[in-house]
Image (spheres, rainbow, N blue to C red):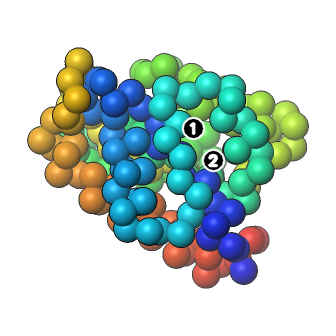
Amino acid sequence: MLDIRSVLVLGIGNRLLGDDGAGPQAIDLLAARRCGATLQDGGTIGLHLLPAIQDAAALIAVDAAMFGAEPGAVRVFEGVAMDRQLGGRKKTAHEVALADLLGAAALSATLPRRRALVAVQPQACDWGLEPSEPVRAALPALCDRVQELLQRWQGAGAA
């Protein structure tokens, strides 16, 4: 059985750029819910996060990401779907940095097999401490998707 404490939930984003801060804001909400996983505010990402990813039994990244939906829409990209979402034409600096971190973990044979990106479609990533109304309204759904993944993965074990 997968120990939920060994799952890293990484909130990615800049809290000073409105909707871009959705990942770290979701981490705050998950902490209040006491979800049981290892929670980390990854900010705008850096190589210092690589050891945490390498040590995790599973990884859930939470971020604002462009995927062509209405602002506030929430999607889960799991496994190779996450890799595809992060590959190709980059729309944010986080996609480049997260893809690079996952690539480095893969090169060292420490990439968590279970991995997912839980993403919200942003409306605006301009200067501001608050997300847009559609993203603010979607924050509970972001957390719900994370908790659903944790429950499913825990029930499925480490396989």
Give SS at disc 1: helix
Q: 6 above or below 128?
A: below
Residue 89: give x, y in percent of width and height: 50, 20
Quarter holding the C terminus is bottom right
**Residue at left offset 77%, top offset 31%:** 104
Residue 17, disc: none
Q: Are marks 2 and 1 in contact (CB under 8 Å)?
A: yes
User: How far from the left and from the top, in percent, is residue 58?
Assistant: 67, 58
Along the viewing direction, whichever of 9 and 32 lies nearer the viewer: 32
Report whether 92 appears left or right of 87: left
Which three-letter amino acid code belongs to the residue tagged 1?
Answer: Arg
How packed is label 1: few (under 14 Cα within 10 Å), some, or many (20 or more)? Answer: few
Q: Is residue 96 above or below residue 69?
A: above
Q: Nearer the viewer, residue 78 or 53?
A: 53
Residue identified by numbered label 2: 80
- Please state if 10 lies on the left or on the right of 99 as rendered: left
3D distance between C-alphas at marks 2 and 1: 6 Å
In this rendering, is residue 74 above or below 144?
above
Q: Position of residue 99 (x, y in %)?
A: 62, 30
Task: Return the mark for residue 84.
Answer: 1
Asked which quadrant contains residue 129, the reply is top left
* 12 lies left or right of 66: right
- Element at label 2: helix
**Residue 88 appearing in the image:** no
Residue at x 52%, y 75% (from the top left corner):
151
What residue sits 62% from the left and 25% below the top? 46
Give the crowd class for mark 2: few <14, some 14-19, many >=20 residues within 10 Å.
few
